[in-house]
Amino acid sequence: MQPYLDFEKPLIELETKIRELKQYSTTDTSFSSEIEKLEKKAEKLHKEIFSKLSRWQRTQLARVPGRPFTLEYVNYIFTDWFEMHGDRLYRDDPAIVCGFARLEGEPCAIIGHQKGRDTKEKVYRNFGMPHPEGYRKALRIMKMAEEFELPIFTFVDTPGAFPGIGAEERGQAEAIARNLREMAGLKVPVITTVTGEGGSGGALAIAVANRVLMMEYSIYSVISPEGCAAILWGDGGMAPQAAEALKLTAQDIDALGDVIDDVIPEPSGGAHNDPEAAAKNVKEYLLKNLNELKYLSPDELVEHRYQKFRAMTRIQE
């Protein structure tokens, strides 16, 4: 059973009761009428809870441990996956996975943040926070994809780039800046999907794309709510208030008009409740957007990306 969040507790308790009644229901002792009433009640409660989620609650959903990560999406959506390792400068960074695969038979490149499930894997993946070598590995794969005229799919799910001393010593800021510059000029289609957390430059370093998509319960922001609260109020405990101020949900960002292109619907209760169904939705949107981009020439793709990010600017006098 998936871990549940505080606001889901009444719903989980009701669903547990329904399962217990079904378990004890027999031909001699049937609870069908009671089960039917409870199922209707659960459906109504589910709609009430998920129609009124605060921004902080949506942030919690974006971080829930059971959400599918990049490699799960690769497994469900693509075929012939071949992972590439190393930046050819320092080492391999497990926080970013890169490689080549096929989407409906067509070859493509895939780059994405990768978090861990258990403690050992979380440490190995550095909680999805890349070092500069991760971004350099990503750029190496992007350049290979460009050379072979392959579309690039990136999957964003990171609290942010790793801020440790070693990462800074090895040029974290330079690695991110270089990715931003080089991605802007890639002459192949680039499609980004924010699947969980889209944290600051650590996310943007693989998200300068022709099309940027967000999962329904994902977030995208310049800083985490906890970090924002610590800076503004000196108290990370005020993260819920910071989340409201940041307006970081997919719905908030979609309302801006130019930052993202689509919000991908998730299964009832979030992608973690049915990863396969979530991946099916993602695949549908990837194919739709790729089909719209593949008719653009290399120069048109670069201009399209340039105009997209220019359009995000708003000037008020």
Image (tube, helix red, strand yellow):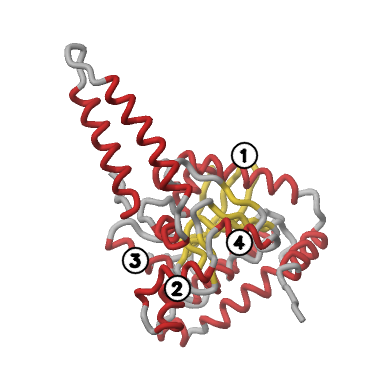
Quadrant in the picture for residue 261: bottom right
Q: Label 1 crowding class (10 Å Cα cut-off): few <14, some 14-19, many 20+? A: few
Q: Point out residue 293 in the picture as x, y percentages from the top left corner.
A: 75, 51
Which residue corresponds to the image point at 45% horizontal and 73% vertical from the top-left?
Answer: 91
Q: Amino acid at mark 1?
A: Glu
Nearer-the-camera pick, 175 or 145:
175
Per the image, the residue denoted by label 3 is: 124
Alpha carbon separation for disc pair 1 and 4: 30 Å
Per the image, the residue denoted by label 4 is: 253
Nearer-the-camera pick, 48 or 12:
48
- Dot 3 or dot 2: first in sequence order is 2
Per the image, the residue denoted by label 1 is: 104
Alpha carbon separation for disc pair 3 and 2: 14 Å
Quadrant in the picture for residue 177: bottom right
Q: Label 2 crowding class (10 Å Cα cut-off): few <14, some 14-19, many 20+? A: some
Q: Foreground mark, 1 or 4?
A: 4
Badge number at residue 189: none
Quadrant in the picture for residue 11: top left
Q: Foreground mark, 3 or 4?
A: 4
* Residue 135 relative to residue 64: left or right: right
Q: Foreground mark, 3 or 2?
A: 3
* Residue 133 relative to residue 1: left or right: right
- Dot 3 or dot 4: first in sequence order is 3
Alpha carbon separation for disc pair 3 and 4: 32 Å
